[in-house]
Image (cartoon, rainbow, N blue to C red):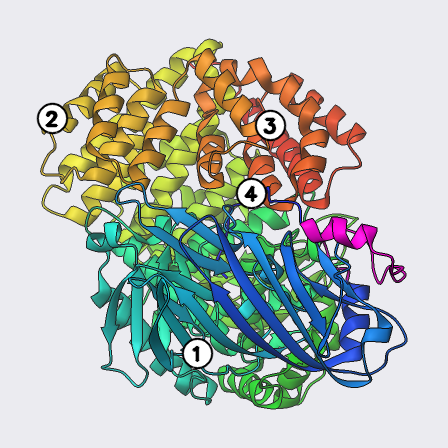
Amino acid sequence: MKQFAPRVMACAIASAFVLAATTAQAAPAPARAENAYLSQADAMARSARVSNVDYVLDFTLTSKESFAGTTTVSFDLKDTDTALTIDLDKATIKSMSVNGKAVTPVYNHWFVTLAPQDLVKGRNSVTISYERLHSTNGEGLHRMVDPVDQRVYTYSHFEPAAAHQMFAVFDQPDLKATYTVTVNAPADWHVITTTRESDVADAAGGKRWTFPRTKKLSPYNFSLHAGPYQVWEDKSGKYPMRLFARQSVAAQVTPADWFRYTKAGLAFFDDYFGIPYQFEKYDQLLVPDFLYGAMENAAAITFAEGGFLYKSAMTPAQKASLAEVIMHEMAHQWFGDLVTMKWWNGLWLNESFASFMATLATAEATEFKDAWQSFYQQDKQGAYAQDQRVSTHPIEVPVPSSANAFDNIDAITYSKGASTLKQLRHMLGEETFRKGVHNYLVKYAWQNARLEDFIGSLGQAAGRDLGKWTQDWLYQAGVNTISASYSCSAGKIKDFALLQTAPSKALPTLREQHVQVAAFKLENGKLVLAKNVPVTYAGARTRVPAMAGAACPDLVYPNYQDWGFVKVNLDGRSFQTARSTLGSVDDPLLRAMLWQALWDGVRDAKLPLDEFIEVALANAPQEKDYTLLGDVLGKVGSAKYYIDAMGLDAGPNRAWAQRTGKAMEDMAWRGVVAHKGNENFQRRWFSTYLGLASSPEALARLAGMLEGKGTEGLQIGQDQRWSIIKHLNRYAYPGADALLAAESARDKSDTGQAAALAATVVRPDPKVKAEWLATIEDLQTKLPFSRVRTAMGSLYPNEQSALAEQSAAARLAKLPAIDKAAGPVFMRSYAGTMIPSGCTPQSVQRLQRAADSMKGLSAGTRRALLDTLQEDQRCVAIRKTLGTPKS
């Protein structure tokens, strides 16, 4: 799976519940807790009794709001000592039989309880026929009506444990099973699942699709998708490939790109793993309203439309993202689908490994050779930031229930884990690491495995015990810091050591790592590499004798080429050299690392924000590396974020804030003009300009561009038009509401409707804010959750702090009640966007009071509250670095 967003669902109450409550037969004692989730203890108890599971699934899809299904599950049962449960969510059960005998369902909306007397030791068969509403929140069998042509599309999403929202199932990863599927669907629909159809026949009301039995899969890796999708096919590779998308967005799809990266990835992974791809075909679907980035369903991978469909030609950055996500989901076909974790505490390893392998494959099998640089700039920095929060957690954490499966799915899970695997590969050696992975996949193919199995395979290949490494890296939280300590004599390094510090007394672990220590000299204004030494360090101090005798450096970077997962604290001389020579550093990865060192200084309240902005204004226009330019301009945007969050326009630093904002705005526009004729760079600069524009002149320029004026050769397509219109509405530009109405009339697509909603919600109008806040907080709203998420993300932009403050106290007070009522899918979006912060001491105090009193929040929401508090504290600290108001 590739990252995220969420919602809660309302469904019909099952009539069978009433039937069960009134039956004369006494219900068996509860087999497990009466709630919507499955505990690890109950899951392990069930898998200890159940084995050799096989599903025969029959679905009737009509395009209406509900669907019908029949599940026949056959399985071996170890004993009949106690009741057994089968998961099925909010369905209306029509009939049920156990081992050929009709029984009255004992059903509580979440699972069916099978009485011991109806079961036998050995082989059992249970058949349940039911009806259920389609989901509209992105889980289960999701249904969407295309507003353009009224066609209906469905797709399934089951991770972490939502297969039981579509059929009766033992919904846990260590009960792998085979699936035999038949589907009745409208005549113009395609039906896609793990296997390729063996027959499509005419049937009443449409077509009947028959699919052969699958290989053994965990429930969350099985899938079924159906609708009148547009389909593209490519048989030029070793495995047949298909791509699906809604018909109304088909013109935005570039199949050649998809097939090129897919074909290259399959060849790369076949070779790297030494095991051929295990499924007969490779299908990929672009689907609407998707909760996450993509999902690794076996042989039928789903991708979020919003992340991969554009109404203008894709930029190199967008193509690189597409390639990386294709590779990520493809790596899962081996590591996740072929071999699967036993329980959700192992989800990190699936995602970390896929992230690591995706970057490796992108770098080695596509044109994006700087994929590791992108990984450093984007993924790894997210992990560093996450690991420095008060809510950080170890990579491997307990998951007591399926309700907690995604509590810790974040940059630690994906990017710190991937960085840790990258470091381990450097430590063990590339071929040793690859051998260990191959042996693991061979040994546990079509089975479930644990972390110990994976680490054991790597350790066996390396001939070393990785127990301490595992304990330090996977079971301890926090990022260490290293710095270079050295002295010089007569122009030469006299002695040299690496100093390692722990994050805090609460997180005292010092780790072993293998890195490169590089020393640079300034020659004719350029940084030149003078010495590079590989070092394995551990403990608080590690001497590096090999550095002695080298020329006394102007800059030392103790994690050269980014081998380690560690925060670098530049020594004083190196820090000043970095500030003054950024533009003259030839190596783009080193340049990125030095930029990050400066930005870390801002975030740690050690480098004044205004001084960083001065460096950025001087150096950003010189940046010629496309990938790094995106990172640098992103930091410029983050600097503006802090200025807006601080509300400096209304304080003693007002003149400085206005002058600085205008300077950043002007720099970005000069970048647009300077790169006329270079579409990729120009679009990158324009995106930055659009984010920075707030002066009347800039807003007028944007409005003119909608009419084709002053575009400097830019192609202002539909995506750009909506971005401009949203921005004009954000700043209440005169006539912006009329522009919004006109654009809504001309673009009635799903993405157009979402963009119009965002542009509406973002307007600085108290009435608009109140109405949309009420909609967001109404858990029974009929608005699709994808739209609710859009509203959440647009409601309170930084510069609208006064409007946000009007509802801040009330929003915070309601947080426990909403958290209790809404559930984890909804709260992952809500808590990330709606907890109020204000970058003031008063806002910090309000959040601190909430943190002190709201101890009963769900784990994910509690963490979001603590993170918001810490970031508010950070913003206040950064504000203090501005010092004396600038005139």
| Residue occupying the point 14% across, 35% down | 673
Distance of label 4 from label 3 (alpha carbons): 34 Å
In the rendered image, the quadrant that contains the C terminus is top left
| Residue occupying the point 79% across, 37% down | 856
Question: Residue 53 colored magenta?
Answer: no
Distance of label 1 from label 4 (alpha carbons): 32 Å
Answer with the quarter of the image where residue 394 lies: bottom right
Q: Which mark is residue 682?
A: none
Please tell me whether the stretch drawn in magenta is mainly helix, strand or loop: loop
Decide: is 433 above or below 535: below
Say which label, 1 or 4, has the lower sequence index. Answer: 4
Image coords of residue 617 (percent x, y): 31, 33
Label 2 crowd bin: few (<14), some (14–19), many (20+), radius 10 Å: few
Cβ–Cβ below 8 Å for labels 3 and 2?
no
Viewer-nearest of discs 4 and 2: 4
Residue tagged 2: 707
| Three-letter code, disc 2 | Glu
| Residue occupying the point 44% across, 50% down | 143
Residue tagged 4: 7
Distance of label 3 from label 2 (alpha carbons): 43 Å
Say which label, 4 or 2, has the lower sequence index. Answer: 4
Which residue is at the front of the view, 394 or 887?
394
| Three-letter code, disc 3 | Ala
Give the magenta part as a residue range: 15-39
| Three-letter code, disc 1 | Phe
Residue tagged 3: 877
Image coords of residue 509 (percent x, y): 74, 59
Label 4 crowd bin: few (<14), some (14–19), many (20+), radius 10 Å: many
| Three-letter code, disc 4 | Arg
Residue tagged 1: 211
In terms of secondary structure, where does tag 1 sit? strand
